[in-house]
Image: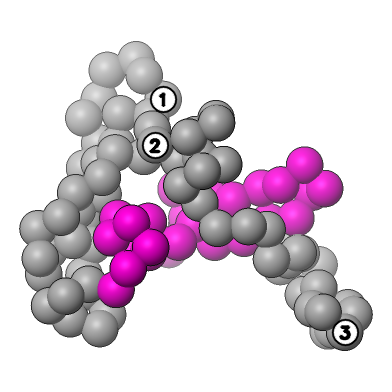
Amino acid sequence: MAARFTLVCTAGHLDEFPYTTYVHRGQACGKMPRPKLRMKDHGGNQAANVTIECVACGVKRNIREAMGERGRRNLPSCRGRHPHLGTVLTPVGLLP
């Protein structure tokens, strides 16, 4: 399945969007260890009119909070990944 949102840093690193952590504001779901999430696109002409909802506990969060300055505050730091190159930057160097 294609990812609708990804994380990209100014150094060109790419990473998966942390949907579960994001919707639960950095915490785990209180109902299930690996909850099912639902993405609702509310349409319109705004690019970020999408809400992520945890089916298990009902918590919701709009993806707009992941953009711009709010995104820098609400998302994890870059992990130095280049998945399109088949490599991951780690504290000890570049691994295949």
Q: Which residue is mark 2?
A: 65
> Magenta region: which residues?
1-28
In this view, the mark in front (2 or 1)? 2
In whole angstroms, how far apart are the C-alphas of marks 3 and 2? Answer: 33 Å
Three-letter code, disc 3? Val
Per the rendering, the mark at residue 47 is 1
**SS class of the residue under badge 1?**
loop
Q: Earlier in the sequence, mark 3 or mark 2?
A: 2
Residue 5 seen:
no
Could you tell me which residue is drawn at 81 percent across and 67 percent down?
Answer: 85
In front here: 39 or 69? 69
Instruction: Find out whether the residues at labels 3 and 1 contact each other: C-beta distance under 8 Å.
Output: no
Q: Cα distance, mark 3 to mark 1?
A: 38 Å
Examine the residues drawn in magenta and state their main secondary structure.
loop
Q: Are there few (<14), some (14-19), or many (20+) residues within 10 Å of tag 1? A: few
Front label number (3 vs 1): 3
87 or 31: nearer the eye?
A: 31
Q: Disc 3 designates what residue?
A: 92
Residue type for callout 1: Ala
